[in-house]
Every structure is written in C-alpha cells, then in structure tokens.
Amino acid sequence: MNRQFLKVSFFPVLLIMLNGCSTSQTNYKRDKAIPYRANISHAPNQARNNIAPASYTGLFPKPAALEPAVDFWRKTYAVWRRSEVAYHDDRFMDVVYEVMPLPGYVAEGLTTEQKMAMSSRRDFWKSRLSELENKLRYNAALNADDRQLIAKLESSGRPLNSILPGAGDRVRAQRGTRERFKRGLEISGKYNLQFRKVFRDAGLPEELAYLPHVESSFQPSARSSAGAVGMWQFTKAAAQTFMPGNNRVDQRLDPFISANGAANYLSYAYRKLGNWPAALTSYNHGIGGMNRAQNRMGTDFVRIVEQYDGPAFGFASRNYYAQFLAAREIASNPEPYFREGIFYETPIHPGQYLAAE
C-alpha cells in the first residue's frame, strides 16, 4: 500500500470520518456471508483456462477494456501454480508468450537456479521480439518461428504495428500464485464475517473484505519492502492517520484494527475521488496520485489505466483494480476454480484474536 495520500492533513481526515459516508454508498447489493462448502467432488482433468468470467454490475464495474487484465489475474490467482511462470506483455495483458515450468522442486521462495532460469527466459523473449521488430523494419526474410510469433501477437485482435513496437521492452515474468491464493481463502474463513461487518457498519460495500487477497493473501504478519505491515499492508505513517490510538503496540499486526483502518481510508478515498475504481487504485498509488491522474485525464478510469503516465503510475498501479476484481470474483465463488474444495478456518472474533496473541 503506497501511501502518497499522507500529504493530506490529519484534521480534515478526522472530520470526514466523523461525518460518515455519503448515502449513495449504502444502496449496494450485499453478498450472502455464507462460507463455500468444502470437499466438493470434481473431475480430475478440468479444463484450466475455460472458466467463464463473472458479470459485474453496480459499484465495482468491469469495463470491457479491463477484461484482459482481469482474466490475466484470474489465471495468476487460480490457474497458474507457483512452479509456473507466465511471460507476457506488461501493457497488453492478453498477450502471453508462454507459461514455463520452473526446474526442480519449487517452494514459495526460489533457488538461485530457478531465478536464473526465469531471468534467462525473459531475456530470450526480449531478444526474440526485438529481432522480429528489426526484421519487419528492414523487410528481412521471416522464418516459421517469426510467423508463429506474429500470429500470437495478432491473436489479441490488435494491429501488429500497434503492439510490436517496443514489445521487447515490455516483457514481464509473472509467477503463478494458485497455492498461495487458495491458502488465503482458507485463512479468510477466520475473518470474513467480521471484516464484512466492519465495512457494512461503515456504510461501505462489504465486498471490500476481499482486499487482503490482493494485499497479503490474508497473512497477518506480512511485510513489504516498502515498509507496509500486516494483513491490510499499512505503513507506519498511514496507521497513525487512519488507526489512531495506542502506539506502544503495532496495531497494523491486528487484522481487525487494520480492517477498521482500511474502512476509514477507503471511505475518505471514495469521497475524494468519487468512484470505486479510483478509490481502490489509490490504496496502491495514493489519493494524491489519483487526484493528479483525474485532473490530467478526467474521471474515465479506463483512460487513466491506458494512457496516464504520471510519476510512479506503473504496472502495479495500472493493474490494482483488475487484481481486486479477479480476487473478488474467485473468492465469492471459488468452486469453479478450486474443485478440490476449500477448508475454511473457523471464524473468530476480535476478542478471540487478541486472546490468542
């Protein structure tokens, strides 16, 4: 959670939180908070890439232009395993060059050999695309591999001359996270009902309870290289603004206190930015950053994602809302993705969590 919003002064934030949320936010359709049943039988050879996307309406729209990115993250979360690496275009998310299995046993962390294999294969695709671009520029003869790569690029439905230039510089590697996401689903059983209540009581859509799937896979002690801590990934400064209280204990490590902090933050972000795609993206890019994007590009979120090139608005920011939509879709209906069943952990309440700690 990149906290550029902290440029906003503390006192207006408190005033807005005390005033509550606008009434327009309370008229949303609530999902039933009923856990998915475990131990569902399944056919062993399920077609891994033929899962139909859900339809989105209301507060969390899914414009057609975002579907390629949502589908990419759907596969990252629920299809590709941690032993698989997808090499793809970081702007045109439906262009996936290959999904490569890593050598040897693959744990959560990678060995030096596996990291080298990832890097080497990424360099291969960068070189292949640059070579193809040069061949077409100088009308050089194409071989069978060149024509196959052209067919892959054109299968996205875009003209070749709009997608090939610079494609070598846009190659990115993404490991699958199916095992991690499934474990996050299991852990979420502890918290789902209480998290939904936190957002519902704040007058916010209770589906925001799915956000830790994107932030931490529901790991209470998660830590990022940017200094964000906990299941909801607050920085220390952000916690002081949106989780004021006793600072002798790091409240970011308490999932329930942090959930209330996230509700405070998202309520404020929505009021400032006016729609949920922008408010959710600000959880990564900051409210100030999204304000600058809207001032420059307008409030059309797709236009911001596709065209905005502001400072620090990179791959993570462009994809954050699509990641949330994909996680929300899977978590709200996991059966088509995890036919082996999800063993949800027993729900707990805030008092139980503190006692356990």
Image (tube, rainbow, N blue to C red):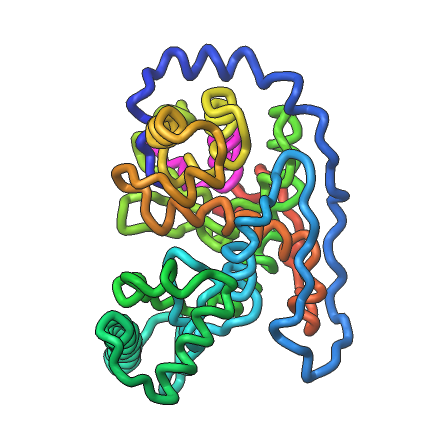
The residue located at (73%, 42%) in the rendering is: 31
Asked whether, in this view, residue 12 is left or right of residue 119, the answer is: right
Quadrant into which the N terminus falls: top left
For this orientation, the residue located farthest to the front is: 139
**How many numbered dots are placed on residues in this image?**
0
Residue 282 in the image, given as x and y percentages of width and height? 41, 35
**127 relative to 27, above or below:** below
The residue located at (71%, 64%) in the rendering is: 335
**221 relative to 42, above or below:** above
Q: Nearer the viewer, residue 134 or 314?
A: 134
Q: Is residue 157 magenta?
A: no
Asked whether, in this view, residue 22 is left or right of residue 277, the answer is: right
The residue located at (40%, 28%) in the rendering is: 294
Residue 10 location, quadrant? top left
Q: Main secondary structure of the magenta part?
A: helix
* Residue range of the region highlighted in magenta in the rendering: 247-264
**182 relative to 134, above or below:** above
